[in-house]
């Protein structure tokens, strides 16, 4: 069975399971979704058609792909053992509860063949905490997407200490083949890569507000009208490289000051129940009251879709040039 069109099983048909189904089906895989809740499964098929239609409308379904063609690749099943037969890759998408991940992986372990990748979508639970005692533990890994993955392609691949190198490579290759952008961690770390970077930024914004340096709105403006513009197409290391005559020159010029500033950024502050929490909440609610959050999320996803289309267009042009 070819890697690019093998069978993929999605376990858990909620928010992220549906997105994975769309990504694998768009790439031509046969996708079977499994869930313990029949209603979730039937709702998922409706939501997937809607998602695929939206992607078609904004031009991100891919050349020659039709809504029906992609949707035909997705089926649902309420029998785990049967749907795992002949699977190439299993993508677990059940809620982020370690005991539930343990239960689901031990169930998968009973039915999978040798060599099948068992990937978890976990956002922050390291794979060793729910795979240690499994017979097929060398086939287990985390492949963490970012929401919404159809417009944010990063996938964090996190092996357990016992994950076979071949499984790491196959997971990475599969993610690349479906149009995602994988990064591979060499070892488990709390928060993986993306959230460690994100939390560093959140915590610095929090400290600046708490210390009275600036308002919550100013922190957001510094990112949305400053840093974020570059970061949508290059990372901080490449920014450094370009902002001097290479990294070495950047470190010579600015390194000592960066170290001095960072020495003042070491204290992690408490978050829940603090006056800073109230101040940031009130500031954000002035912009978007809690009852308007669904509409704002929709707006965010539309902007992300447009940004993804723009980036794709530029990358295609650069390839042709
Ligand atoms: N929501 C996000 O933004 C996001 C982003 C990245 C990763 N993740 C990760 O993806 C995973 C799923 O999150 P979600 O937001 O899609 O959750 P969700 O609550 O939307 O969906 C979970 C689904 O799992 C099903 N389920 C529960 N127990 C099950 C079982 N024993 N067997 C099969 N199905 C079962 C539920 O019926 C439900 O349909 C979590 O680990 C989460 O951390 C979520």
Image (tube, rainbow, N blue to C red):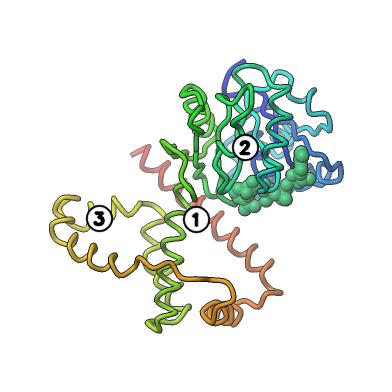
Give whichever of discs 3 and 1 has the lower sequence position: 3
Query: In the image, is 91 to the left or to the right of 200?
Result: right
Residue nearest the viewer, comparing 192 with 230: 192
State the residue position of label 3: 240
Quadrant location, the N terminus: top right
Nearer the observer, 234 or 187: 187
- Horizontal and vertical percent for residue 5? 62, 23
The crowd level at tag 2 (other Cα within 10 Å; few <14, some 14-19, many 20+) is: many
- Residue under the image location 13 percent in, 57 percent down: 252
**Disc 3 versus disc 1: nearer the observer:** 3
Residues at discs 3 and 1 in contact (Cβ within 8 Å): no
| Rendered image quadrant of residue 32 | top right
Find numbered disc 3 in the image and state the secondary structure of the residue it sits on: helix
Instruction: Name the residue rendered at 33%, 39% in the picture.
Output: 321
Could you say which disc has been placed on residue 307 in the image? Answer: 1
Q: Secondary structure at mark 2?
A: helix
Q: Earlier in the sequence, mark 1 or mark 2?
A: 2
Q: CA distance from mark 2 to mark 3?
A: 39 Å
Real-space Cα separation, disc 1 to disc 2, in angstroms: 36 Å
Few, some or many residues within 10 Å of mark 3 (<14, 14–19, 20+): some
| Image position of 115 with respect to 134: above or below | above
Relative to residue 234, is residue 84 depicted above or below?
above
């Amino acid at each position: 069975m070819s890697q690019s069109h093998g069978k993929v099983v999605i376990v858990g048909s909620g928010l992220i399971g549906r997105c994975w189904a769309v990504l694998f089906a768009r790439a031509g895989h046969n996708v079977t979704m499994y869930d313990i809740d029949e209603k979730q499964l039937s709702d998922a098929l409706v939501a997937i058609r809607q998602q695929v239609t939206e992607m078609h409308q904004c031009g991100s379904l891919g050349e020659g792909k039709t809504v029906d063609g992609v949707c035909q690749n997705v089926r649902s099943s309420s029998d785990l053992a049967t749907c795992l037969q002949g699977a190439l890759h299993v993508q677990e998408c059940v809620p982020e509860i370690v005991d539930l991940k343990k239960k689901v992986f031990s169930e998968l372990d009973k039915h999978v063949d040798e060599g099948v990748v068992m990937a978890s979508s976990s956002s922050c639970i390291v794979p060793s905490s729910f795979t240690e005692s499994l017979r097929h533990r060398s086939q287990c890994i985390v492949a963490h997407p970012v929401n919404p993955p159809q417009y944010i392609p990063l996938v964090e691949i996190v092996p357990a200490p016992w994950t076979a190198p071949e499984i790491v490579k196959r997971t990475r290759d599969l993610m690349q083949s479906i149009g995602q952008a994988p990064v591979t961690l060499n070892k488990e770390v709390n928060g993986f890569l993306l959230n460690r970077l994100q939390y560093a930024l959140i915590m610095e914004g929090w400290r600046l507000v708490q210390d009275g340096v600036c308002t919550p709105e100013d922190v957001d403006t510094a990112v949305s009208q400053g840093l974020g513009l570059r970061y949508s197409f290059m990372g901080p290391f490449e920014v450094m490289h370009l902002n001097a005559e290479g990294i070495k020159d950047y470190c010579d010029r600015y390194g000592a000051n960066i170290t001095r500033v960072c020495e003042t950024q070491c204290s992690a502050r408490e978050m829940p129940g603090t006056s800073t929490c109230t101040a940031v909440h009130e500031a954000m609610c002035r912009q978007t009251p809690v009852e308007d959050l669904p509409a704002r999320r929709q707006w965010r996803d539309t902007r992300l879709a447009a940004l993804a289309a723009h980036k794709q267009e530029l990358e295609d042009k650069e390839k042709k040039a």
